Amino acid sequence: MKRSDFHNNSGERKNVGKRRYITGFDGLRVMALLGVIFYHLMPYTVPGGYLGVPIFFAVSGYLITDIFIQEWDRNGKIKLGSFYLRRLRRLYPTLIVVLITSTAYMTVFAQNLLSHIRNIIWTNLTFVYNWWLVGNGQSYFDRYNGESPFTHLWYLSVLAQYYFIWPIILIVLLKVYNDHRTQVAGVLFSLSIISTMLMAILYSPDNVNRVYYGTDTRVAPFLIGAALAFVWPSTRLTRNLKLKTNIIANTLGLLILVAMGISFFNMPGTTATPYYGGIFIFSLISVLMVAIIAHPSFIWDRALTNPVFKWLGSRSYGIYMYQLPVMIFYEQKVTNIAAHPVINTIAPLIIILLISELSFRFIEVPLAKFDYRNTFRAIGAIFNPKSGLGWRRYLAIPVILVTAVAIYGAATAPEKVAQKTDGLQTKLAKNSKATDKKNAEALKKQKAAKKAASESSSSKNVKLNKKEEAIAKKYNLTPQEFKFASTVPITGVGDSVLEDTATDLQEVFQTAYMSAKVGRQVGEAQGVITSLKSQGNLSDNVLINLGANGPVTMDHVKGIEKAVGSKRHIFWVNVHVPTQTWESSVNKTLAEAAKKYKNFTVIDWYTPSKNQPGWFYTDHVHPNPDGSIQYASIAVKQIVKTLDKQK
């Protein structure tokens, strides 16, 4: 689009069209918001819900750029100061409330979540939290290992960086290339491809933080949306298009919405697909949907406009901000979530909506209109009995108290807060060192053990020495079971539950090699197994304990099956995670996998442990010393039984 399109021959500015509020974008925002929320509530059902974020970026890229171009064409300049002020008025109040109230709550009720709280606060207030997460935060997809109530705020930091950097770049582009706006769109699209390539290059299955949180690797949807604004300005779109064009565009819009919905259910962030072009393709169709909604001739602006979407859309910022703190705090207090998944999905959702409504009415709207030059006058009025505020003055008391508690908690909390879980962390650290030592010994023993295992399995009269008898008695094993297990080559791959039980397992499986890591996601397993295989450290029997940190899909199982190979046997321990909604989903997936694959056996830990609270630490997931013995006994008996049948 050329500059002449906006000027007449005498150099006077043309009317660039009346600014439109495109109500259909509320519907698109609601779709994005629901994706993100239901990913957090039901990651096993909506594993691709995190894709709501590229939708938000795409809409923001288009709207911000479109508004700025309109302003440029009307006035020949862009008022950066007023824009920045509006953005700060919009972003800061709710952000500060979330930081203060969450910190105060953690100080009183959940001190184990206060780790790095000072860094979290200042990086959020300066909008660089996403970069702090790259080097210090946990994976966005780690749903169990002490999930932070602030992790979702990475999006706000990235968005704020776009808001404050992009207008400056845009002004330069408009000054230099105003007569060649189509070419600018091409440049922006090319930059989005470069960002996507950078994501693919930097992607590591062992740590997705760099590509998931990085501003540079997540800018593609924003750039594509901005490019659209140069060639698809909302005020220049004609209402009268041919019927055929309308039919094609409206049908395409329906297909895009269906494709986006399918992606929410079929593109988990724990696989490589999103980072090797999946997010880019999703961003492309999101921007295409933005274009269809923006056009007044198509039905989708009207179709996505209704009172419900308008209500949710206007409160979408608050809903997004409050969602994770509510969910995390709820999960900490309600420990039987898996037993009532429907109720425990609806309850936090209602709480989020109620808090967001109160925030919208009493924080977001009033403070967006407040004249901050009157701040000191307003504070004085609170303490002045004659100010006319009446009983409303006393609302300042809980605000002051909550703020004081938050400040105290942030000031006094250690940088790394020790997790008070009845010695679990101490046990994990001790087991990690012991496992490393035993792993080195196990690799030396495995070749000799293979022959010994074959001989011991056929012997009915097995004699044990006193040490062996004590171990067999400890784990409730027969002499035959113990002797056979002690020589079985086995490789374990798992998370903190495996690390918790590894020492007991290796006391029986005396040639076992264990690869366990706190917070390990099932999506990492394929890479770990492939690495072990290439090093020659993958045994004929592979024990897997994954699923406590997040949902397991058949695609995950398929990938692990492929990495292990059909000649090896997989023993997968099902999960006891009563504090998470995905418990039954993981166990159901494993049961289905056992029917599908001949070399796949489920070790049932869930059934015998579900009514045994005395087997677990206070987190209800990690076996305590007594539970660890039971875990090892159950695993050994199932593995020995399965392998003995194969002889």
Image (cartoon, rainbow, N blue to C red):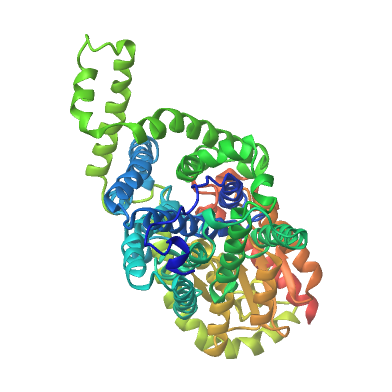
Closer to us: 10 or 145: 10
Please determine whether, in this image, residue 150 is positioned above or below residue 281: above
Which quarter of the rendered picture does the C terminus lie within?
bottom right
**Most distant residue in the front direction:** 10
> Residue, x 71% and y 63% (percent of image)?
590
Closer to us: 244 or 149: 244
Q: Evaluate whether residue 331 shows in this view.
A: yes
Q: Quadrant of residue 490?
A: bottom right
Closer to us: 566 or 320: 320
> Residue, x 68% and y 70% (percent of image)?
555
Residue 183: image x %, image y %? 46, 76
> Residue, x 45% and y 44% (percent of image)?
321
Residue 530: image x %, image y %? 57, 83
Please determine whether, in this image, residue 599 is positioned above or below residue 352: below
Closer to us: 110 or 242: 242
Residue 123: image x %, image y %? 29, 54
In the image, taking residue 536 as reference, residue 480 lies left or right, namely: right
Q: Evaluate whether residue 611 shows in this view.
A: no
User: How many numbered tags mark residues here?
Assistant: 0
> Residue, x 53% and y 84% (percent of image)?
531
Residue 597: image x %, image y %? 78, 74
